[in-house]
Image (cartoon, rainbow, N blue to C red):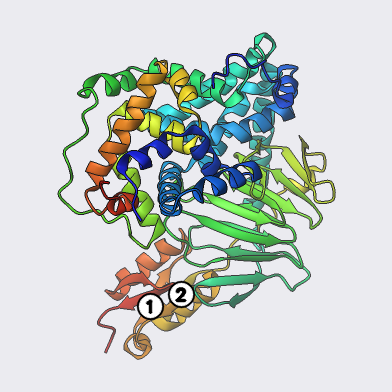
């Protein structure tokens, strides 16, 4: 499962960009900036901070393009670089520090109905539920279920070991079920102990 | 049919499964199909897990990422420009030239007492507050918008817009050539759609012309140009132009060569002074000029004779003054302006 044994795959777009091809840079931006923003919003929650850091990241990329290494996964590389930059912001560090470790907000007494027919409302309700998770759990949810990364890749980006990432994911799913309440997360009503 | 919480979680923890749900491919399809049919409980389990993953993906994606990416890209351009110092120097020089030009134009305009006023284009109401203004004449015609913006249409040009724009956007669709003077309003960005070209106004005046090959040239302020549906955009400063070639689907940025296209063609707005005029006639003039629909009790206000000068300000300023004079109030409901008041005996 480990990807460390694989040879570094060369992404032709990345190689063109390293040579100073502006179109390749624009393509790289178009492809990666939106998901990076989605991840940044999950980590910091502040639009201004995310804009600042994403801009900083791409300007730096362009300026240091000649010195960049070939990378196995461009997305993984950029996510990690973005996280590093975000964590250097005092406001973001505070978010991660202040909360009690791995303790979700108390359960909302209101019944949240995820069977809501309106997809947009359902999406907002789920998003709000994820917002209530501890930061690291939010992060792992984003990396796994939005960015589509493996647990191992998520662990690498968050600078934790594989088991910690798997545990975070386990707790996130568990907490989500609690936050959303019984009868909420559609699948979770139907299962029976057995 | 049943499955356990543990089974469900195992699937959510499974990298291959999650990646297949997010990015289905043929190999994944056959693999998970086969797995599913090994046990009667699995189709329901898979369906539930898929739903959870897709719901979470959609919830996580509910961020205006594309829009923010566009904004960041624009802001980044200044930092990424290769010859930044040179460009800055040129930009500063053009602004000075334009200021000098504007001054000259203003003096010339002020010196002529008998200037003809701007002709109005034909305005067609298309329902829901939508307006189509067409210049069917041989000369220039000017559309006045409620926010104070003006669009001067070349012969044959058409614009389509909402007479009373919403709280967060001013959108105009253009066919043909027109000169835009956009009133600043940070809350409501002004966007012009011409063919496949999208021009977002960050500042004040510019021209868009052409059908197949569309040119956007900037006189004052700052404008961003992009392909419809794409994030990449080009920022245009005064005296810069972007030429969109529909055939090659490219946008090229250059300095404006034909300075004449940047001359402000605008004539003064039509007179808006009234002397002992019945209120409904003034309302009719506002309705005709701005393409706005009014609803009020015409008979109630028929006897209100008003002497007022409404030359200054936007549509809303004029409306405020008129209502004050009438002792009336107005509100905007369903794309129309409703006026209520006691009227005159």
Same-chain check, marks 1 and 2: yes
Mark 1 element type: strand
Is residue A109 found left or right of B133 in the rendered image? left
**In the rendered image, which quarter contains the N terminus of chain B?**
bottom left
What is the x, y in percent for residue B286?
48, 73
Mark 2 element type: strand
- The residue pinned by badge 2 equals B274
* Badge 1 vs badge 2, beta-carbon distance below 8 Å: yes
The chain letter under disc 1 is: B
- Identify the disc placed on residue B270: none
> What's the distance in space between the residues labelled 1 and 2, CA to CA?
7 Å
Most foreground residue, B187 or B17? B17
For the residue carrying disc 2, how many other residues have a C-alpha within 10 Å: few (<14), some (14-19), or many (20+)? Answer: some
Can residue B68 be seen here? The reply is no
Q: Quadrant of residue B12?
A: top left
Most foreground residue, B119 or A53? A53
Q: Quadrant of residue B306?
A: bottom left
Look at 26% across and 89% down and name the residue there.
B345
What is the x, y in percent for residue A165?
38, 23
- The residue pinned by badge 1 equals B306
For the residue carrying disc 1, how many other residues have a C-alpha within 10 Å: few (<14), some (14-19), or many (20+)? Answer: some
């Amino acid at each position: 499962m480990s990807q460390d044994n694989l040879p570094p795959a060369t992404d032709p777009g990345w190689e063109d960009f390293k040579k100073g091809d502006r179109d390749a840079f624009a393509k790289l931006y178009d492809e990666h900036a939106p998901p990076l923003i989605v991840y940044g919003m999950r980590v910091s929650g502040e639009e201004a901070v995310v804009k600042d850091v994403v801009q900083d990241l791409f300007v730096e990329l362009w300026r240091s393009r000649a010195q960049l290494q070939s990378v196995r996964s461009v997305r993984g590389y950029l996510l990690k670089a973005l996280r590093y930059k975000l964590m250097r912001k005092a406001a973001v560090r505070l978010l991660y520090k202040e909360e009690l470790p791995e303790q979700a907000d108390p359960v909302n007494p209101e019944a949240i109905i995820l069977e809501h027919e309106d997809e947009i409302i359902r999406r907002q309700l789920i998003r709000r539920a994820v917002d209530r998770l501890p930061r690291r759990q939010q992060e792992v949810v984003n990396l796994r279920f939005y960015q589509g990364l493996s647990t191992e890749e998520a662990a690498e980006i968050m600078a934790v070991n594989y088991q910690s990432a798997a545990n975070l994911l386990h707790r996130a799913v568990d907490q989500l079920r609690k936050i959303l309440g019984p009868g909420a997360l559609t699948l979770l009503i139907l299962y029976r102990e057995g | 049919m049943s499955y356990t919480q543990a089974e469900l979680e195992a699937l959510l923890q499974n990298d291959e499964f999650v990646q297949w749900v997010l990015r289905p491919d043929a190999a994944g399809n056959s693999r998970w199909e086969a797995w599913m049919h090994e046990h009667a409980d699995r189709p329901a389990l898979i369906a539930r897990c898929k739903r959870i993953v897709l719901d979470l993906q959609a919830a996580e994606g509910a961020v205006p990422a594309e829009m923010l990416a566009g904004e960041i890209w624009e802001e980044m351009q200044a930092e990424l420009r290769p010859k930044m110092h040179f460009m800055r120097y040129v930009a500063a020089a053009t602004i000075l030239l334009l200021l000098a030009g504007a001054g000259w134009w203003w003096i010339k305009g002020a010196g002529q007492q008998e200037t003809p006023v701007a002709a109005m284009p034909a305005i067609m109401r298309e329902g829901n507050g939508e307006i189509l203004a067409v210049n069917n004449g041989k000369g220039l015609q000017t559309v006045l918008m409620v926010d104070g913006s003006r669009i001067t249409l070349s012969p044959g040009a058409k614009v389509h817009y909402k007479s009373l724009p919403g709280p967060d956007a001013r959108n105009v669709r253009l066919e043909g050539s027109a000169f835009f003077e956009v009133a600043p309003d940070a809350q409501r960005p002004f966007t012009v759609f011409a063919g496949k070209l999208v021009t977002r106004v960050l500042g004040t005046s510019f021209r868009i012309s052409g059908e197949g090959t569309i040119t956007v040239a900037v006189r004052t302020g700052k404008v961003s140009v992009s392909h419809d549906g794409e994030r990449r955009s080009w920022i245009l400063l005064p005296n810069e132009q972007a030429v969109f070639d529909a055939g090659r689907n490219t946008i090229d940025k250059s300095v404006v060569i034909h300075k004449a296209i940047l001359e402000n063609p605008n004539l003064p707005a039509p007179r808006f002074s009234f002397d002992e005029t019945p209120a409904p006639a003034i309302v009719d003039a506002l309705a005709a000029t701005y393409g706005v629909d009014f609803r009020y009790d015409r008979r109630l206000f028929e006897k209100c004779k008003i002497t007022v000068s409404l030359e200054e300000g936007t549509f809303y300023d004029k409306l405020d003054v008129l209502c004050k004079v009438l002792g009336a109030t107005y509100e905007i409901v369903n794309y129309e302006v409703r006026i209520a008041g006691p009227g005159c005996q």
